[in-house]
């Protein structure tokens, strides 16, 4: 029986539901160009480390920067609240799963110290690597000038969902166009997952946007709030906004797919969906010596009233260099992420990330299970 619909729903796709079609021409992996440029800064590979306390500290940001990537330090995290964050991180690692949420809420209630912001940024800058920090929209006007004075190179304004227009009781909230004009630094803003939101953010003058709402391994925003779009569809939709904006203005605003990337295949599919770079958390939290000491938790987990996230045990599986460049000691795609990207680009015939964005993709829900009976039954 035909009946009127209250709303139409479209199908959206995540990493496990699609596959990349190899190219008609292939390229040697070592001849692929995977550099990522934002403002005057060039990264040797297009991976950003998430602004999460279990992933980025000044020391890990330095290590990651020297490898050629970019670590983003959370200016509203433990590093900016405690003189000795290592002791706090150890306390969190030793906490039981049942007690950790209450402990996180308590520890993140400590005030942010502006002097620590300057000290952390200074430590990273003295090491000679690009320094990037993250703040929430509510605190951007307060902390962005402090970060700039300390010498930060790239500013990230990030929350679960960020839009160019926001209704609040504030007499004057954060206006991104004014921020870009005043701060005069490359600005990355996120997160979003739709064409219109991405296009409006791009029109404010930002240099890059973060794509992804709720896909992170330690995030439960989708369970608690019911919001989000699977990453392949979200990235593709925001990439369409990037192309529209580029045609309108001639300015290319980069897309950074943020969250849900666990394996090399996820990373490769992000670029084929339209990403210029990716931001990852839990894969890097697995590095030996990572701040989380084998654990990982999300930015919204310590919320005082509605925590969203869970502390997940990721273990310490390999060195940071192994996770990024190999050599891999496992066959599950969790190590040598750069090698996976270069090889996938080569097989798809893409010499550059821009060419990889145009790789043919197909809907293929059986891509990881077809013919894999022995692996699934034997746990191989």
Image: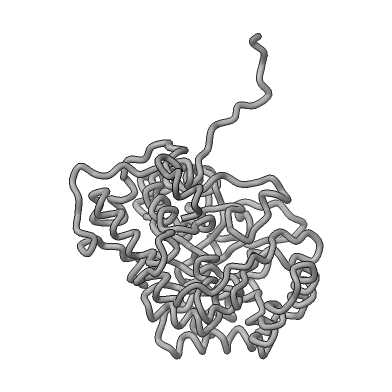
Q: Nearer the viewer, residue 120 or 366?
A: 366
x, y percent for residue 271: 38, 52
Residue 107's quadrant in the figure?
A: bottom right
**Nearer the observer, 143 or 89:** 89
Q: For residue 38, what is the image quadrant? A: bottom left
Which residue appears farthest toward the top when viewing the image? 1
The colouring scheme, among rainbow, by chain, secondary structure or one colour, is: one colour
User: Can see residue 266?
Assistant: yes
Q: Residue at x 34, y 71 (%)?
A: 327
240 left or right, relative to 74: left
Vertical relation: 147 (above or below) 263: below
Residue at horizontal 44 percent and vertical 82 percent from the top: 63
Q: How many marks?
A: 0
Horizontal side, residue 266 vs residue 229: left or right: left
In which quadrant of the rendered image does the N terminus lie?
A: top right
Residue 76 image position (x, y, % from top left): 65, 74
At x 49% / y 79%, what residue is drawn?
61
Residue 103 position in % (x across, y down): 78, 74
Using residue 348 as the reference point, say whether residue 96 is left or right of it.
right
Q: Position of residue 43 (x, y in %)?
A: 36, 71
Q: Is residue 205 visible?
A: no
Asked where in the image residue 44 lies, by quadrant, the reply is bottom left
Is residue 200 shown above or below 58?
above
Foreground pick, 253 / 316: 316
* Residue 351 appears left or right of 103: left
């Amino acid at each position: 029986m035909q009946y009127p619909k209250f709303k139409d729903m479209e199908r959206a796709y995540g990493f496990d539901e699609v596959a990349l079609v190899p190219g008609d021409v292939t390229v040697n992996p070592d001849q692929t160009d995977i550099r990522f440029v934002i403002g005057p800064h060039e990264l040797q590979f297009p991976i950003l480390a998430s602004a999460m306390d279990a992933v980025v500290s000044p020391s890990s940001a330095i290590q990651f920067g020297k490898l050629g990537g970019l670590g983003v330090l959370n200016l509203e995290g433990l590093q900016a609240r405690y003189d000795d964050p290592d002791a706090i991180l150890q306390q969190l690692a030793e906490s039981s799963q049942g007690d950790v949420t209450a402990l996180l809420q308590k520890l993140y209630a400590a005030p942010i110290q502006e002097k620590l912001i300057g000290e952390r940024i200074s430590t990273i800058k003295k090491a000679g690597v690009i320094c990037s920090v993250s703040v929430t929209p509510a605190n951007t006007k307060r902390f962005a000038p402090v970060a700039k004075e300390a010498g930060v190179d790239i500013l990230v304004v990030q929350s679960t969902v960020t839009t160019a227009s926001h209704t609040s009781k504030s007499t004057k909230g954060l206006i991104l166009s004014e921020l870009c004009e005043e701060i005069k630094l490359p600005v990355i803003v996120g997160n979003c997952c739709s064409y219109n939101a991405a296009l409006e953010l791009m029109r404010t003058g930002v240099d890059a946007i973060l794509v992804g709402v709720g896909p992170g391994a330690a995030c439960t925003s989708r369970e608690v709030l019911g919001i989000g779009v699977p990453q392949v569809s979200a990235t593709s939709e925001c990439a369409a906004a990037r192309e529209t904006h580029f045609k309108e203005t001639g300015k290319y605003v980069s897309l950074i797919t943020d969250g849900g990337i666990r394996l090399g295949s996820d990373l490769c599919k992000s670029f084929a969906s339209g990403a210029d770079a990716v931001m990852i958390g839990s894969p890097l939290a697995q590095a030996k010596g990572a701040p989380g000491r084998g654990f990982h938790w999300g930015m919204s987990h310590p919320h005082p009233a509605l925590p969203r996230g869970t502390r997940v045990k990721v273990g310490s599986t390999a060195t940071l260099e192994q996770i990024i460049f190999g050599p891999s000691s496992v066959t599950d795609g969790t190590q040598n992420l750069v090698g996976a990207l270069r090889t996938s680009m080569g097989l798809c015939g893409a010499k550059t990330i821009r060419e990889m964005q145009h790789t043919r993709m197909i809907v293929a829900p059986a891509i990881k299970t077809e013919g894999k009976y022995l692996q699934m039954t034997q746990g191989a």
